[in-house]
Image (cartoon, coloured by chain):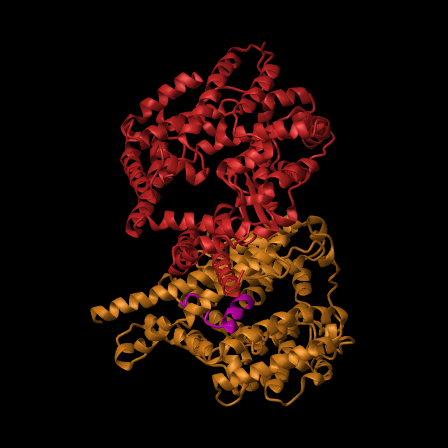
Chain colours: A orange, B red
């Protein structure tokens, strides 16, 4: 590489790092707002966030960025770059194009609209009145359709939205895998609904001291290999994980005094996200690649740790004694098998975020089908409540009696996040597929988990997934790790095996 | 005001607000670093801080700023501005000039030097070896002398440094007030040293539960009128208060399990700073005036609440029962008078930050005299340990046996903060003078405090001081509130009265 190119590359990397610095500063402020920033300072803080976001956006679409990208995408220059720099150029170019194609006034209008829509949605949900939210949602759909025209699309229009969260994912692929998943899960859920031997979950809803919950959550996180010198655990209304940089990956949870499972499994879930971000390769620091490769793969890690490790019997054979020790009056008379069965209870329900491992995917498919139809003008916004309720009745056998527990339950659409929901189900499918491979490579896995040997699992995931960050696309990751493309069979098999046993189905 | 001027003014105000937004973001990040940010994220965070600081500095000295200031300082334009905008222009101009006069490379060298010097100082203190720190301090003094030449000065060179922390303060004024203060405090301290009736402070050093200390600190802050919806209390090694914006003013303290007074009076002290920042006028939000007018006046408010309210007998007559309630085994047998006498113990000592209300000022004067002499080339850096020890022997009657407890005890010089120390003593003098006026205007003050009526005190301070922020200079504030210029007699009278009674001197 010639001297000038090297200098230019280093200037380009400095620009990228600058953008990442703004992102990190914003991350600290969002974390702060959600974990106890004083109420009266919020307005002032919003202005600060506005200033930094604007500057970050300005850098992303700057003339300087454009010039760098023009230069580095020239074939004779691109070919001189190493793997990491190529991918940085590619991802930066993708972001640049996406941002540049929307006229700034249009984007500004959209930002204002979605920020209004979120508070309208809150009110509509409170009053369970879809008609309040409808005009906003109609506009949001229209803007998204316009954006798709500007961005361009291949095949289905919805592909462009999917690609934002899961690069390379398409309606064609999703229809296929979701179809298989649906065909096998709907009957399974129906059989469970009719099962007689249902666990009594009342012991999960006694009083659980928050301090002790926190202590136990910290203990489990340490066992998972979460590094408290590179993170911290705090409380917020909605749990989240945020990777500010690989040395500072924070988790929050919500310790509910009358529900032990919420914080417990929530912490393991966010812990899975955090392990990904804590174990990104040092080489990627300060670059656009220093994060999870997609929402789906990120979710696969939270789900892997939550469902495939944290909800497994070997895990509780190891840790249940400590748990009973922390809560002797609540759990003293509950056996580990009872505990395991109960936390894995499957019950078709109306609310996505309360859904179990089995029925969760059906909640996602309903949203996916609706989004796809909306974007392609196959249904109208005003038809949503009706369509929603019909699908819930068909897939889950339950029917919302009010929009608050139906079409109004999720915040995503008010913010315009179409294309995001599938990530959750993709995460479950990826996780099952990854687990299948891990079992092949570590035949002794259950016994290891039962001995509390979680460290090799984290190391394996680091080696196969975490360290690559965004250097590899999600499809490359899954192919590299498991030797095949996304395949829903592993999740279906897992769910069938697990729930047949728990509910003694035959 | 003509239309164009109004538009320009609003663009100027937007630029100022932008600078303030960077300042607030940096404030959040510093707060975060000091209250529990994970160790491994610190390096990454430093880069983020670097990026934002650089951008903030760039805006401060930008061509845009220069053009605005050129325009608004034209007499025919300036005369059209209202009081607030005039002062904004004045302060911005002062900052612009100060920053512009230092060549950027020179400033960069100085930043690197002081950041190295701080870690060298830490090591030197640990090894109690001044010779390690000496070469760095010599350079830092030289840079400050150079800067003074570039900035210009009137009268004494040290005036330029004083003015950074206490606008308008000069060596001529300080020599006078410090002289009076010294003449009356040194003999008083000597008399106390010989007093026979000394309190037994061992009960302050029992085990005090941290959780209960936190609860009690929160209670006292609320009683002072600290608004927890516009702030929060956290823990850090070195206590501080930070005003991010008037709706978000945070306090930290350090709850020591074997010392009840550290966190208690520390919290009241930081609470005083915080009341100032929480009660700045809404009109000043987002401007350069939205902060305390000087370090001295700021310190006067922390000292007012700590020494004149929190260390007073009426205060404890009201709150001691609650305190005993929180710590019955430690304080059950201690009367309020014993408690009051003990927390007010005066004892000449070697360490400034552990000094009592009386001897504290002597620690400051020693540093002031040394700084002034250093800047004016009247002493050399290598003479410091000797000069330091001689002054401690003369003023306080105690002699350091090691540099760690002598000349190396404070961090300030390693960061180049010459001119800062006098603020602490000025704060004490201002506080006494303000208290004198308050007593005249509220003759019933002691009885009010004894009834826990602290609210009117906060309101009075807000009306007289807090709301003005930097709109008035410190000398204007003190003149407006008390009807006279800074006068050390009030502090001397207060100390003489208080300690004569406590130590039964006659």
- Outermost residue, front side: B76
The magenta-colored residue range is A288-303
Q: Is residue A457 visible?
A: no
Image spot of residue A327 (x, y percent): 67, 50
Name the residue at 36% across, 65% down: A15
Residue B121 place in picture, x, y as percent: 35, 36
Query: Could you say which is closer to the camera, residue A117 or residue B342?
Result: A117
Residue depicted at 61% across the width and 32% down the height: B208
Give the answer, above or below, for where B159 lies relative to A441: above
Question: Between B128 and B436, which is closer to the camera in this rendering?
Answer: B436
Q: Does residue B378 appear left or right of residue B172 in this picture?
A: left
Q: Is residue B407 left or right of residue A408?
A: left
Within the image, what quadrant is residue A399 found in? bottom right
Q: How far from the left and from the top, in percent, is residue B35?
A: 52, 46
Q: How many numbered callouts?
A: 0
Residue A290 belongs to magenta span:
yes
Measuring 36% from the left and 30% from the top, which residue is drawn there?
Answer: B371
Q: Could you say which is closer to the camera, residue A96 or residue B323?
A: A96
Q: Residue A177: horizontal and vertical position, in percent? A: 55, 83
Assign the C terminus of chain B to one quadrant of the image. Answer: top right
Direction left: furthest residue:
A2
* Quarter residue B392 falls in: top left
Where does the N terminus of chain B fall, quadrant-wise? Answer: bottom right
B380 to B499, vertically: above or below: below
Q: Is residue A402 above or below residue B144?
A: below
Q: Magenta stretch: residue A27 in it?
A: no
Q: Quick check: can you spot residue B347? A: yes
């Amino acid at each position: 590489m010639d001297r000038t190119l090297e200098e230019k590359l280093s200037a380009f990397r400095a620009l990228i790092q600058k953008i990442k610095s703004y992102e990190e500063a914003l991350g600290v402020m969002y974390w702060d707002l959600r974990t106890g920033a004083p109420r009266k300072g919020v307005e002032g803080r919003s202005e600060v966030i506005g200033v930094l976001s604007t500057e970050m956006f300005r850098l992303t679409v700057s003339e300087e960025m454009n010039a760098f990208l023009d230069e580095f995408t020239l074939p004779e220059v691109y070919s001189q770059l190493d793997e990491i720099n190529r991918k940085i150029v590619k991802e930066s170019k993708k972001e640049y194009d996406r941002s540049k194609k929307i006229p700034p006034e249009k984007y500004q209008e959209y930002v204002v609209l979605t920020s209004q829509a979120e508070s309208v949605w809150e009110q509509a949900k409170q009053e369970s009145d879809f008609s309040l939210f409808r005009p906003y949602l109609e506009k949001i759909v229209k803007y998204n359709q316009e954006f798709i025209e500007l961005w361009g699309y291949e095949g289905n229009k919805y592909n462009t939205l999917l690609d934002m969260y899961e690069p390379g994912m398409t309606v064609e692929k999703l229809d296929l895998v979701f179809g298989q998943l649906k065909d096998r899960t709907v009957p399974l859920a129906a059989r469970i609904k009719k099962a007689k031997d249902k666990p009594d979950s009342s012991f999960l809803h006694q009083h659980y001291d928050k301090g002790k919950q926190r202590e136990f959550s910290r203990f489990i996180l340490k066992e998972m290999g979460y590094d408290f010198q590179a993170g911290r655990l705090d409380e917020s209304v909605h749990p989240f994980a945020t990777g500010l940089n690989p040395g500072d990956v924070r988790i929050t949870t919500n310790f509910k005094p009358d529900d032990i499972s919420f914080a417990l499994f929530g912490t393991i879930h966010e812990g899975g996200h955090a392990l990904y971000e804590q174990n990104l390769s040092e080489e990627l620091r300060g670059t656009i690649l220093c994060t999870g490769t997609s929402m789906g793969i990120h979710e696969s890690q939270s789900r892997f740790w939550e469902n495939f490790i944290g909800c497994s019997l070997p895990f509780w054979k190891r840790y249940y004694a400590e748990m009973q020790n922390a809560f002797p009056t609540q759990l003293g008379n509950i056996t580990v098998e009872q505990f395991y069965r109960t936390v894995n209870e499957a019950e078709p329900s109306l609310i996505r975020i309360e859904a179990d491992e089995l029925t969760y995917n059906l909640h996602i498919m309903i949203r996916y089908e609706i989004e796809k139809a909306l974007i392609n003008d196959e249904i109208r916004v005003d038809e949503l409540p009706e369509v929603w309720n019909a699908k819930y009745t068909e897939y889950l056998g339950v029917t919302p009696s009010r929009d608050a527990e139906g079409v109004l339950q999720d915040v995503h659409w008010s913010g315009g996040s179409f294309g995001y929901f599938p990530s959750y189900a993709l995460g479950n499918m990826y996780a099952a597929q990854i687990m299948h491979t891990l079992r092949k490579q570590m035949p002794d896995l259950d016994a290891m988990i039962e001995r509390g040997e979680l460290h090799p699992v984290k190391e394996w995931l680091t080696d196969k997934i975490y360290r690559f960050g965004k250097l590899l696309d999600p499809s490359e990751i899954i192919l590299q790790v498991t030797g095949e493309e996304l395949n829903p069979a592993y999740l279906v098999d897992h769910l069938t095996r697990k729930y047949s046993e728990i509910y003694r189905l035959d």
